Image (cartoon, coloured by chain):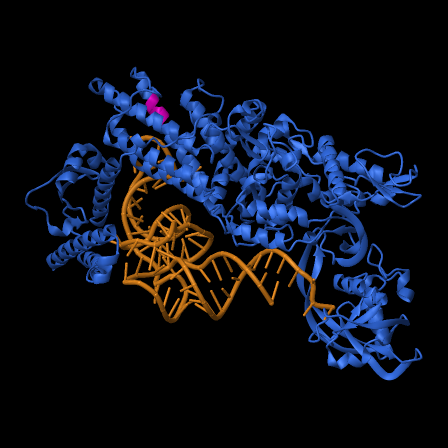
RNA sequence: GGGCGGUUAGCUCAGUUGGUUAGAGCGCCUGCUUCACACGCAGGAGGUCACAGGUUCGAGUCCUGUACCGCCCACCA
């Protein structure tokens, strides 16, 4: 054993070393040949953006995955955790664009090819940062499998997936209304639009009604209401509800579109609500999804009046070239001038903003690529309905169904340069499109060689949605794919439930259904799912429950906090606060507490090593497999260890990280340190040759229990446990790492409830004497004699463990007098015993009376409560026997205590 | 407009299928440099479980409603 531990634990002294060791020793590397063992545990890291820096959310996510993965590994399963990063289309492109801006350049000036090369260069320089941070935190991942979503093989798989979906008729291209970000100059999916309530205005505009000869009828107007007046430049009709009596006379009439002078029809459509606004809606099919639908129903043309940057285009007449909001102002001014502007009302509506850059998104007619999602969603719904994928907390299944059942086709094309380019080629001759795995030489339709590749790239989530199988070699049927798919678990935040989790389920169920299972048989939905369980965790907020964000400046950098408190302490804090369903308010105070916990473990080790050394000097060598002690405290701590191991295993099985953390914390600090270590000090006298065997046995149990406790703690606190575990073996450890040893499993034969109950009684006795001493103001170091009245059982137990009671209760001696000899003011009574100490200073009568009266009130309350129930026929008849008996016992005890307390009060007079 | 979650000690949170006197950490108060640890030890104070009804022998736990907080989804101009 290494004995020269520093007095206070300093995490920085050991963590870097072990983090590097775990990587360099390739301890967590896995190959599929090892996986002959059944049920490998496989988990995929949600790939962080390659541009990212680690934040507390990542750390929570990784802590949970690491605890679970280490736990499975220590249970003897083959555990594989696959790391990687995501190319993160928009985010990365934005970052490099910003860098270029700093140099006074734009990506357009660079050109596509050079720009993409520039992004690669950036990635090569900085792309590893976030995974390096992860290495520092000790994540037990298989680094040999690290992937990047734009890697050669993954890109090929993406292409294959696209082509197959296209062949299956599940990908189509067409002009529809999409969400357009004028800053990013690309289409984005519905999910990438965040809605915000905003106070705006609802403007009423009068459209002149045209008479039979195409001339405005004097004084005749149809008034529409709109929140986006500038889009009127693209109006092609005004719609009213067919049943709206106010407008029946206008059915079939034409209107004159103000400012543009265009003739547009009045159409009737049931979608229009007579209650809202004026009951008349201007129809702009190119700039609003509802209007687009109306346009389709009525065979109306679509007129786009804005360009990619949300400036008015040539279709907007004299407003051409104006920014959309400038145009809005002009349009309103001009309408006003012409007397066509009606009432203006305050109106709150929700506007969509780009998730990335927060620009106001413009719904806009645009030609894009879409996935026909319903067939994929159907399978994804079935997989969860049939229990092939289990959500924890189960609540999230509802959210998932809700979204999946109302899903819209997925716009997967992006007008970006950084990403997987869509494998489609446009024919310059016949205008048809050829979709192919390899660059085609001729148009599939007309054979022309005049082909140009589609410039759009795919939504980032398209490629990440394929990861659970592409990381294992799909579309090839590789041994890895056979062995490791489906993965077991996905751990992630709810914020990407739809973005990523739902897409993986859809794409996994779709593509993997076609891949035979290892024995060559047909795969069913149960084994096509990308993972069998999803654990969804909370958001990490700051101590004031605010969302961490750069703009608020309340972001806690995990690496900084880790350097301050140690990785283990931060991990333990996150785990202990990770109760399902609630966000985590990250608290430094709590982290401080867990740093203290690490220090506690460290010092327990110092204590143990010190005694091991003393023993060695006396010629006693500790045996990690040797016979242990038969003393009460030894049997008790062994029993506790096994009970706790059982509970911890159960808690982790339910992903109750908080519960598991609490259990190991209380076991180690409460049971092991506060009680067992204090008691065992009595047994470690190696100078007395008469006690050699019992001292050796006590030492064996001590070291064995500590070693087991380290294994129990290891998934939560891998660094300190690794350090101390190696120290226990003093360089002769039976494995390269504690992570490769066994997690403690409960041995039922070692759990002894009698021992645990007996020990609990003694603890109660000791604590009561301590409290009594305190009340009597007995100086800490002054031993006093005690008298105890109690049952035979506890009496014998106390006699048998006389030394223990005397030491821990700080009493010189105790006996069980037939007759009470002490002044009654110096006693204290509990359900199991009355104890008194011989000390001349009397309890302060006033304080004691107050305390006793409080107790009395407590007993009265119990008596009243139990009495009410015990006198109730219905209760006696219906309640289970166990409850009734318990209540009776409790009532009897309370009555006895009440009587004794009354006596004591009497004597105080 | 739909849907979901929360409200328990000063703070942050647990509380398993309803069952005997509701727990933890931090903070607070008191005493202790006890030879592993002051990042410690020992003792203690502190809660009518948001509110109002209901079901039940029995409710922090189940049901209904109310208030407040938070989140998600949504094509009403």
For chain A, give the colour.
Answer: blue
Q: Which residues are magenta?
A: A608-612
Q: Which chain is orange?
A: B
User: Residue A70 versus residue A63: which sits nearer the camera?
Assistant: A70
When asked about the image quadrant of residue A619, the answer is: top left
When asked about the image quadrant of residue A906, the answer is: bottom left
The extreme top residue here reads A619
What residue lies at 45% left-to-right and 43% top-to-bottom? A656
> Is residue B29 shown left or right of residue A385?
left
The extreme front residue here reads A521
Say if residue A48 shows up in the picture.
no
Q: Position of residue A824 (x, y in %)?
A: 12, 51
Position of the N terminus of chain A by quadrant: top left
Q: In the figure, B26 relative to B37: above or below?
A: below
Is residue A287 a member of the stretch shown in magenta? no
Say if residue A578 shows up in the picture.
yes
Give the mark count.
0
Q: In the figure, A77 relative to A406: above or below?
A: above
Q: Position of residue A554 (x, y in %)?
A: 59, 50
What residue lies at 8% left-to-right and 46% top-to-bottom? A820
> Is residue A628 shown left or right of residue A398?
left
> Is residue A909 shown left or right of residue A130?
left
Is residue A611 a member of the stretch shown in magenta? yes
Q: Position of residue A306 (x, y in %)?
A: 84, 59
Position of the C terminus of chain A by quadrant: bottom left
Q: In the figure, A864 relative to A102: above or below?
A: below
> Is residue A458 shown left or right of residue A762?
right
What residue lies at 19% left-to-right and 62% top-to-bottom? A871
User: Residue A707 versus residue A263: which sits nearer the camera?
Assistant: A263
Q: Position of residue A623 (x, y in %)?
A: 34, 19
User: Residue A154 versus residue A854: which sits nearer the camera?
Assistant: A154
């Amino acid at each position: 054993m290494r004995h020269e531990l520093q007095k206070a634990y300093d995490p920085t002294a050991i963590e870097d070393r072990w983090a590097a060791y775990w990587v360099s020793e390739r301890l967590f590397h896995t190959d599929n040949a090892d996986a002959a063992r059944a049920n490998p545990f496989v988990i995929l890291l949600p790939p962080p953006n390659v541009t990212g820096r680690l934040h507390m959310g990542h750390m929570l996510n990784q802590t949970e995955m690491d605890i679970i993965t280490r736990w499975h590994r220590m249970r003897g399963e083959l555990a594989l955790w696959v790391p990687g990063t995501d190319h993160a289309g928009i985010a990365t492109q934005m970052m490099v664009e910003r860098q270029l801006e700093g140099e006074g350049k734009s990506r357009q000036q660079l050109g596509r090819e050079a720009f993409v090369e520039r992004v690669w260069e950036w990635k090569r320089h900085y792309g590893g940062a976030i995974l390096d941070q992860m290495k520092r935190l000790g994540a037990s991942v298989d680094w040999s499998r690290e992937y990047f979503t734009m890697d050669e093989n993954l890109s090929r798989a993406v292409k294959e997936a696209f082509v197959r979906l296209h062949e299956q008729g599940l990908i189509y291209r067409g002009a529809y209304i999409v969400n357009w970000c004028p800053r990013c100059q690309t289409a984005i999916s519905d999910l990438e639009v965040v809605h915000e309530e905003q106070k705006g205005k609802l403007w009423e505009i009068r459209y002149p009604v045209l008479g039979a000869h195409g001339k405005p009828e004097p004084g005749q107007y149809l008034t529409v209401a709109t929140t986006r007046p500038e889009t009127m430049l693209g109006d092609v009709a005004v719609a009213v509800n067919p049943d709206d009596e106010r407008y029946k006379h206008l059915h079939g009439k034409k209107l004159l579109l103000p400012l543009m002078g265009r003739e547009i029809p009045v159409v009737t459509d049931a979608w229009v609500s007579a209650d809202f606004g004026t009951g008349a809606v201007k129809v702009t099919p190119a700039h609003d999804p509802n209007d687009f639908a109306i346009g389709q129903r009525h065979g109306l043309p679509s007129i786009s009046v804005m360009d990619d940057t949300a400036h008015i285009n040539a279709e907007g007449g004299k407003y051409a070239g104006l920014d959309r909001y400038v145009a809005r102002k002009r349009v309103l001014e001009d309408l006003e001038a012409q007397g066509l502007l009606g009432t203006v009302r305050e109106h709150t509506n929700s506007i969509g903003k780009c998730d990335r850059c927060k620009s106001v998104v413009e719904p806009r007619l645009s030609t894009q690529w879409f996935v026909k999602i319903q067939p994929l969603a159907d399978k994804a719904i079935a997989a969860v309905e049939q229990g092939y994928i289990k959500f924890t907390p189960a609540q999230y299944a509802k959210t998932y169904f809700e979204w999946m059942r109302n899903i819209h086709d997925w716009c997967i094309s992006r007008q970006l340069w950084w990403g997987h380019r869509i494998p489609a080629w446009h024919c310059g001759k016949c205008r048809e499109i050829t979709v192919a795995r390899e660059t085609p030489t001729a148009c599939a339709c007309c054979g022309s060689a005049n082909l140009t590749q589609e410039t759009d790239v795919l939504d980032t989530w398209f490629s990440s949605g394929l990861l659970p199988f592409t990381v294992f070699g799909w579309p090839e049927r590789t041994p890895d794919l056979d062995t490791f798919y489906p993965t077991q678990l996905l751990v992630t935040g709810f914020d990407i439930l739809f973005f990523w989790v739902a897409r993986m389920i859809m794409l996994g169920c779709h593509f993997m259904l076609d891949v035979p299972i290892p024995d060559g048989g047909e795969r069913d939905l149960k084994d096509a799912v990308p993972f069998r369980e999803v654990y969804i965790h909370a958001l990490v907020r700051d101590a004031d429950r605010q969302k961490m964000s750069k703009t608020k400046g309340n972001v806690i950098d995990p690496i900084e906090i880790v350097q301050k408190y140690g990785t283990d302490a931060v991990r333990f804090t996150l785990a202990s606060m990770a109760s399902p369903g609630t966000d985590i308010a990250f608290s430094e105070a709590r982290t401080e507490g867990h740093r203290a916990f690490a220090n506690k473990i460290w010092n327990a080790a110092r204590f143990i090593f010190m005694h091991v050394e003393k023993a060695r000097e006396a010629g006693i060598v500790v045996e990690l497999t040797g016979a242990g002690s038969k003393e009460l405290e030894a049997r008790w701590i062994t029993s506790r260890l096994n009970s706790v191991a059982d509970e911890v295993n159960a808690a982790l099985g339910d992903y109750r990280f908080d519960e598991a953390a609490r259990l190991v914390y209380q076991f180690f600090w409460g049971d092991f340190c506060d009680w067992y270590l204090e008691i065992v000090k009595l047994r470690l006298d190696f100078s007395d040759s008469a006690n050699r065997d019992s001292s050796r046995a006590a030492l064996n149990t001590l070291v064995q229990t500590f070693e087991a406790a380290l294994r129990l703690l290891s998934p939560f606190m891998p660094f300190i446990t690794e350090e101390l575990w190696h120290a226990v073996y003093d360089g002769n450890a039976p494995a390269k790492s504690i992570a490769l040893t066994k997690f403690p499993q409960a041995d039922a034969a070692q759990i002894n409830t009698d021992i645990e109950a007996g020990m609990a009684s003694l603890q109660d006795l000791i604590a009561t004497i301590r409290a009594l001493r305190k009340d009597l103001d007995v100086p800490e170091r002054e031993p006093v004699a005690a008298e105890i009245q109690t049952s035979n059982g506890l009496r014998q137990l106390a006699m048998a463990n006389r030394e223990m009671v005397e030491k821990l209760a700080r009493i010189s001696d105790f006996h069980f007098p037939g007759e009470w000899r002490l002044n009654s003011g110096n006693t204290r009574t509990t359900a199991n015993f009355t104890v008194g100490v011989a000390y001349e200073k009397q309890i302060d009568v006033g304080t004691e009376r107050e305390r006793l009266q409080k107790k009395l009130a407590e007993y009265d309350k119990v008596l009243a409560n139990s009495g009410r129930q015990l006198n109730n026929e219905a209760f006696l008849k219906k309640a289970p026997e166990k409850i009734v008996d318990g209540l009776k016992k409790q009532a009897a005890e309370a009555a006895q205590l009440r009587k004794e307390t009354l006596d004591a009060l009497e004597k105080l007079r």
